[in-house]
């Protein structure tokens, strides 16, 4: 018998277009020459940041439940959104508000969800995107399943799942990658590597040098991208989606960014990471570099910035007013939509709940 | 029963192009028990797919497919392997409709063999249905004959919500019964009265119906007339039929193969205690599997409630 020997080597390309000072370090893709297209991305990144600060403030003042901030992730979230088509399907984690807002989810819906109301998951648009997913990594399988549905029906659509760095330790993630590779599914997995799974740094999750290389064992390509560079994220994601849509199979993209906030409003990151590390991370953040680039390109100026900030504040205030003005659901809501038709047991218990409505706790 | 299950699959795949069958070995092999025999040859590899070997993945991809409009019928090869899938079943499948206020839904059927008595290896003989019955938002259904397997599986596939469909493994090849392949579903959420009687009500389901019906034959010889209800849908329970029967007979014996502790029998006993106590002329009896691990097959017949235990329980209620 011949001596068996298999040599496998792989490389994980890393993509970046804008450096942290907004300088162009690679060839600009076509969309980057379109001033309005670029401004649209910058506007949404700014809106997400203004919204995020307001949401944290609402939680601090008792007007919102626990909230997961997206501070620092804006380029990854908007870059991915801009690469997707409306008919594609997004399987988010619970932090990618800017991606969802690009696709039509409203700030009122986001606030309703974190404000303890399931109607936040009933997006007016996009109707087929998955709702927020709290059980870590489980959404990657939903994306693979959706992609399987598109493949079976020969629809030129893709699914895209976000997952965090911690999520890549979950079995569901590997199972989704394996399925996607084995069946050449039109799905792209975007790992948002923000350095932290609550208090656990990436180096404690894995000894793999990159998270993108986890794709290799599933037989699919893995890429890294500067997740604070919206141009690079959009360009790479668009390429991966084009391949997937064309029947070329899935991809994994690891977006390298940094969680500038606490994990959620229930967390205090100062317990486990030094202010110095966070200060350094701020030097890499995504908005400043994009603004510099837009100004250099002649796409942006101080007066546009002023108008944008005023507009964002007004939009956020309007959404907050809508959210705060939305009355809570009646107790009947607990018994609706569990099944298409409520069971006899649910109808009976609905009566009990009605009888005790408003008399909860010690009242 | 196994042919009836394959027949129901085929009928509904023919009738509804959204029905897709997935699982381990369901394709070329037609399932390890042959429940999906011939389907891949007839409907192709897109609609009858062998999946990679990962139960959480089978359930999770079913969620994704169903949310995008397909109707997956997914096989978990044995009930002892369903546990990795519970994350997806409990956290997503059961509540997709609820948490999106009806925007998305999960019309999925998870089929899995249930129970012992087939001399199978370890982990192949589980009856842990009460784990699933506790979860809001899913139906748990178990047939007890080829005709009911056919009709209930059709109903499960047509149902707009998730159904866990348990198939009593020792009935797969136990009984021969002609089943009309007419596409007619049986109703979910109702018990089937297998036999009318006036002295005692016996509620059971799945493979235990066989032992119960044999016990009833014994009891007949002693002049005891037992009414036998096949629960069929384990969640939600058809309380009306059970309460009406107990009102008539005044006595209740519940027989299940699963361990007694927090078994579905406890829910039925509680139901009758809450709503039918004054109809009872004797304490309720439960005849169940013991609260221990399902033993390997040399002892499995000692674990599964026997005809003798059932007869004794009935006589105990009559003596009370």
Image: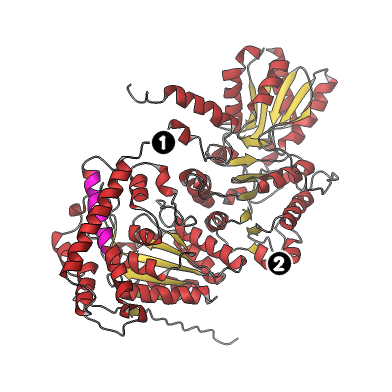
Reply above or below: A359 against A85. above
Q: Which mark is residue B44?
A: 2
- Which residue range is magenta in the image? A46-59
| Quadrant of the frame with the C terminus of chain A | top left
Reply above or below: B43 against A134. below
- A125 in the magenta segment: no
| Quadrant of the frame with the N terminus of chain A | bottom right
Tell me what residue is drawn at x 26 percent, y 46 percent: A266
Residue B5 visible: yes
x then y, percent, for residue A294: 23, 75
Would you call the spot at circle 1 few (<14 residues within 10 Å), some (14-19), or many (20 or more)? few
> Image quadrant of residue A98?
bottom left
Q: Are marks 2 and 1 on the same chain?
A: no
x then y, percent, for residue A200: 28, 58
Mark 2 lies on a secondary structure that is helix
Q: Nearer the viewer, mark 2 or mark 1?
A: 1
Tell me what residue is drawn at x 53 percent, y 51 percent: B85
Which is nearer the eye, A207 or B203? B203
Lateral position of residue A270 relative to residue A330, left or right = left
The answer for how far apart the CA atoms under marks 2 and 1 are is 46 Å
Lateral position of residue B143 relative to residue A21, left or right = right
**Taken as a whole, is the magenta stretch helix, strand or loop?**
helix
User: Residue at label 1?
Assistant: A329
Lateral position of residue A76 relative to residue B320, left or right = left
């Amino acid at each position: 018998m011949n001596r068996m020997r298999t040599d496998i080597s792989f490389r994980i390309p890393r993509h970046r277009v804008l450096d942290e000072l907004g300088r162009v370090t690679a060839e600009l893709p076509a969309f980057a020459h379109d001033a309005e297209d670029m401004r649209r991305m910058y506007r949404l990144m700014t809106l997400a940041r203004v919204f995020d600060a307001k949401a944290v403030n609402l939680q601090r003042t008792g007007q919102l439940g626990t909230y997961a901030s997206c501070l620092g992730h804006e380029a990854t979230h908007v870059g991915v959104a801009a690469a997707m088509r409306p008919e594609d399907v997004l399987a988010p984690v619970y932090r990618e508000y800017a991606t969802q807002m690009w696709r039509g989810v409203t700030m009122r819906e986001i606030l309703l969800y974190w404000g303890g109301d399931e109607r936040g998951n009933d997006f007016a648009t996009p109707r087929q995107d998955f709702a927020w997913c709290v059980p870590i990594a489980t959404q990657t399988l939903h994306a693979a399943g959706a992609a399987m549905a598109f493949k079976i029906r020969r629809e030129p659509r893709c699914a895209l799942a976000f997952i965090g760095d911690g999520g890549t330790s979950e079995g569901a993630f590997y199972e989704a990658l394996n399925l996607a590779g084995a069946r050449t599914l039109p799905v792209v997995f975007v790992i948002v590597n923000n350095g932290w799974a609550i208090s656990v740094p990436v180096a404690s999750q894995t000894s793999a040098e990159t998270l993108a290389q986890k794709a290799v064992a599933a037989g699919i390509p893995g890429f890294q991208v500067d997740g604070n560079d919206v141009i690079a994220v959009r360009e790479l994601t668009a390429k991966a989606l084009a391949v997937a849509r064309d029947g070329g199979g899935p991809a994994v993209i690891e977006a390298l960014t940094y969680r500038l906030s606490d994990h959620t409003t229930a967390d205090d990151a100062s317990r486990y990471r030094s202010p110095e590390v966070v200060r350094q991370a701020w030097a890499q953040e995504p908005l400043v570099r994009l603004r510099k680039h837009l100004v250099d390109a002649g796409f942006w100026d101080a007066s546009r910035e002023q108008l944008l900030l005023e507009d964002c504040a007004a939009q956020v205030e309007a959404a907050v007013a809508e959210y705060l003005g939305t009355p809570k659901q009646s107790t009947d809501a607990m018994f609706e939509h569990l099944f298409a038709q409520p069971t006899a047991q649910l109808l009976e218990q609905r009566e009990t709940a009605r009888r005790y409505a408003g008399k909860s706790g010690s009242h | 029963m196994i042919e009836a299950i394959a027949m129901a699959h085929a009928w509904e795949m023919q009738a509804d192009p959204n029905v897709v069958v997935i699982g381990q070995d369901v394709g070329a092999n037609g399932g390890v028990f042959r429940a999906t025999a011939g389907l891949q040859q007839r409907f192709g590899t897109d609609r009858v797919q062998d999946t990679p070997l990962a139960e959480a993945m089978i359930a999770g991809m079913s969620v994704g497919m169903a949310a995008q409009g397909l109707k997956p019928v997914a096989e978990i090869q044995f009930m002892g392997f369903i546990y990795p899938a519970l994350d997806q079943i409990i956290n997503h499948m059961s509540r997709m409709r609820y948490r999106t206020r009806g925007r998305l839904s999960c019309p999925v059927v998870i089929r899995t063999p249930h129970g012992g008595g087939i001399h199978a290896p370890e982990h192949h003989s589980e009856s842990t249905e009460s784990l699933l019955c506790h979860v809001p938002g899913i139906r748990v259904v178990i047939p007890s004959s080829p005709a009911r397997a056919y009709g209930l599986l059709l109903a499960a596939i047509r149902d707009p919500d998730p159904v866990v469909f348990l198939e009593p493994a020792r009935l797969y090849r136990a009984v021969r019964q002609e089943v009309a392949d007419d596409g007619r579903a049986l109703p979910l959420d109702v018990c089937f009265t297998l036999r009318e009687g006036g002295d005692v009500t016996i509620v059971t389901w799945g493979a235990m119906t066989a032992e119960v019906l044999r016990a009833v034959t014994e009891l007949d010889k002693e002049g005891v007339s037992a009414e036998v209800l096949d629960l069929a849908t384990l969640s939600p329970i058809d309380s009306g039929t059970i309460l009406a029967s107990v009102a008539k007979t005044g006595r209740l014996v519940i027989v299940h193969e699963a361990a007694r502790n927090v078994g579905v029998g406890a829910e039925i006993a509680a139901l009758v205690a809450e709503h039918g106590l004054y109809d009872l002329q004797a304490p309720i009896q439960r005849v169940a599997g013991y609260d221990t691990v399902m033993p390997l097959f040399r002892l499995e017949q000692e674990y599964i409630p026997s005809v003798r235990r059932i007869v004794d329980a009935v006589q105990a209620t009559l003596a009370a």
